[in-house]
Amino acid sequence: MSTWADGPLKTEQEEIGLEMQSNQEVLTEARLQVFERIIGVQLPNHYRDFLLRYNGGYPKPYYFIISEGQGKGMVNIFYGIGGMYDNLDKKIDIFDDILNAGFLPIADDSGGNQICIGLTEKCFGNIYFWTHDEDTEDMGNMYFISENFKVFLENLYD
């Protein structure tokens, strides 16, 4: 059964308005910590807060700007942690080359491209757009979107 959660995402005394349609299971702090141990990194706080509140789902609004040359993109679904179809564990297995390069796929668009969050010191917390149909040598198909997850959510539009 799908539900819509509407309301602010509270992070560091700030709020982000977002609607999420989700049938995802509730994520506990303990389960999130297990996931972080598996990938070997504690996730950025804004993204952790998002997972604990929504644990994935379909956002409203969902458009974002990739770059001037690339134009706009859209978030189809944010992945969750647990037994749902679109879960992070499954995506890590499929896109292990992205993870090995220091990025975690956190969402996709309708064409199978990935929205990723940086996990290395150099790009920790930054949001990127990875296109699967471009040359992947040296991650030349990875486009910087925003400096953190909160800003990415704030910049989504209808």
Image (tube, rainbow, N blue to C red):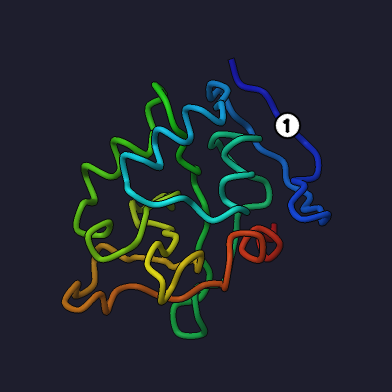
Question: What residue is shown at x 52% (from left), y 85% (from top)?
Answer: 68
Q: Amino acid at mark 1?
A: Ala
Q: Foreground residue, 37 or 21?
A: 37
Residue that protrudes farthest toward the bottom in the picture = 68
Residue 103 horizontal side relative to residue 17, left or right: left
Residue in the image at 29% along x and 74% along y: 141
Give the side of residue 8 with respect to residue 60, left or right.
Answer: right
| Residue drawn at 32 percent across, 66 percent down | 131
- Image coordinates of residue 135 in percent, x first then y, are 19, 75
Instruction: Name the secondary structure under disc 1.
Output: strand
Residue at the extreme left: 137
Quarter of image, res 49: top right
x, y (%) of residue 19? 72, 41
Instruction: Using the image, determine if residue 28 lies above or below residue 108.
Output: above
Depth check: 113 or 10 in front? 10
Q: Residues within 10 Å of mark 1 (few under 14, many from 20)?
A: some
Residue at 40% in and 32% down: 34
Q: Quadrant of residue 150?
A: bottom right
> What residue is shown with label 1?
5
Q: Is residue 105 above or below residue 83?
A: below
